[in-house]
Structure formats: structure tokens, C-alpha cells
Image: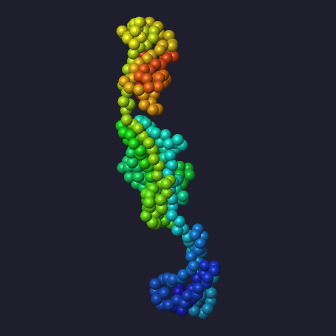
Amino acid sequence: LAKPGMVITVSDGTTTTPITLTAADVASGFVLASFTKPAEGATQTVTAKLTDLAGNLGTQTVSDSATLDTTAITVAVTRTSTTNATLGAGGSEVITFTLSEASSNFAWNNTTQSGDIVVTGGTLGALTQTANPLVYTATFTPAATSTGTATIGVLAGKFSDAALNNNLDTYTNPATAPEVYEANNQVSVLYDTLPPAQVVSFSSMTKDSGVTTTSTINSNWLTNDTSAGRLVSGFLSAPLGAGEVVNVYVGGTLIGTATVAPGGTTWEITDLAGYASNASWEYTAKVA
């Protein structure tokens, strides 16, 4: 049991300090000692031994250790697409968040679209930690029936490391000290989910008993020839835009992309399937 007059000797391996206990020290249950802080990332261990009133050095040594960590945690946000592709209707893309060290409070609520991530122009799915504990992924889906540039990013002061160092990196430019601007804190995603402006219509199908000498007029879309290789054609109300195509389906299954001349308003595709006798089937076409 500690008593006034006993000496507690503390050391960090470099500096040794003897402290004679006072009545106040004994009553409070602790003493204070100062040491030069270690280098960043280094561990400092302090030991203590007690000498009694007779000058006998105690045989028990107690110690405690701490590692100095004042480095701010960081995050890098990246897209899966290496070509910065534009997302269309029904499209999505996985966004990756890579931390510089582990964090227990980097979070995102995809139900309320709130948390440590700022999203514009769409929604971000659930944040999933990968096998690498520093890497997280979430799927971005652009806003429907809209066009523009979406952003996904992380501002400063949103999460911390085990030493409670907050992230200081931000996509705000210029940043206000101690925050630091980092371009990789945010990604941009072009998207166009507006429905196509063109109206697609059908004009004719070869092997149709109703096709007249004018190939763009059909009387019935009936046929007694179910063999493969019929040419299906149609019209567009306006030329296709950049990157747009006409997809043709039978019974909801894609059979291919139609041929459309640059700037043209007609399309055609060869149906390579054969059909059973007395069968019926349905063609649909849409701009994608």
C-alpha cells in the first residue's frame, strides 16, 4: 500500500524520473510524469517501480504503452468504368471507396441516402466492405428520365481512424485549413436516362402474303412461309442520336440490332429464326 514518502520511479527507457509521493498523491491515487513524445508511428512504453520507506526497491514493474498517430485518415473515390462511360436508363456503376487505414465509423444509409457520402444526380446502394477492410463498394444508379452529371464524393470531417483522427481531405476547392483539397475525393458520372425521342414503327416483312409491289405496304402480316431468313423493316420518326441503336425483339427476346444508315430514318434486320407451322410470333423494336 502506497504511503507518503515512498518513491515511484517512472521511465520511458530514455528518461528516468523518481517521484516522492506526498499525502495528496496518495489520496488522489496517481502522479504525473512527462516524457518527450515519440516519433510519428512509434510506440512509447513507460514503466514504474515503487521504493518503500526503508529504501527497498519493489520487485514488481508495471508498464503501459502508446503509439503516436496524428496522421489524418483519407479516402479515394473511384469509378469502375475506365472510359468514364455515360450511364443510360437501367444502367448503374460500382463506386469504390478506398481508405488509407481502418475506420469503424465510415458509414452510409442507402435507405435514407444519408451518411458520410454526398450523392447528386441519383442514388447510391448499400455500402459493402470487401475482403480488404480498407476498401468499400456501393452501386450508383442515375436519376430516372433525366440527363446531367452526377457526383459521388466525401467531404472532410466525416469519419475517423482508431486514434480518432478525422479525415481532413475534401473535394471542396479551395479547401479551408486544416482541410486539404483532394481531387480523388469525388467522381463525376455523366448520365442520360431520358426516353428516346424517336418513334419506331414497322413497315414490312418479307415472306408475308400481304406484301404488295410497294414494299412499304402490308395488308395483313400473315405468312404461310415459316422458314428462317425473313427481312423485317420499319421507320424512325427522326434520325438516331449519337450512340443510339434500334434493338429488335421476338416475344421479348432480343434478336439483334437493326441496320440504320447514318442520319437515316429507315431500319431493317434479318430474322434468322424459323417458326413452326401455324405458329404466331410478335416483333417489337425500340431505340436504346
| Farthest residue, direction front | 263
Which residue lies at the image location 47% right of the left edge and 25% below the top edge?
Answer: 262
Vertical placement of residue 21 versus 218, above or below? below
Which residue lies at the image location 42% right of the left edge and 40% below the top edge?
Answer: 191
Vertical placement of residue 107 versus 22, above or below? above
Vertical placement of residue 249 versus 59, above or below? above
Vertical placement of residue 153 versus 85, above or below? below
Which residue lies at the image location 48% right of the left edge and 19% below the top edge?
Answer: 269
Residue 267, image quadrant: top left
Residue 210, image quadrant: top left
Residue 115, image quadrant: bottom left
Q: Is residue 114 visible?
A: yes
Q: In which quadrant is the C terminus drawn?
A: top left
Count of marks, rendered view: 0
Q: Is residue 160 visible?
A: no
The percent coordinates of residue 140 (x first, y second) are: 44, 44
Nearer to us in this view, 149 or 62:
149
The percent coordinates of residue 7 (x first, y second) are: 57, 88
Q: Tell me how the rendering is colored.
A: rainbow
Nearer to us in this view, 281 or 76:
76
The percent coordinates of residue 174 (x first, y second) are: 44, 60
Which residue lies at the image location 51% right of the left edge and 61% below the top edge?
Answer: 73
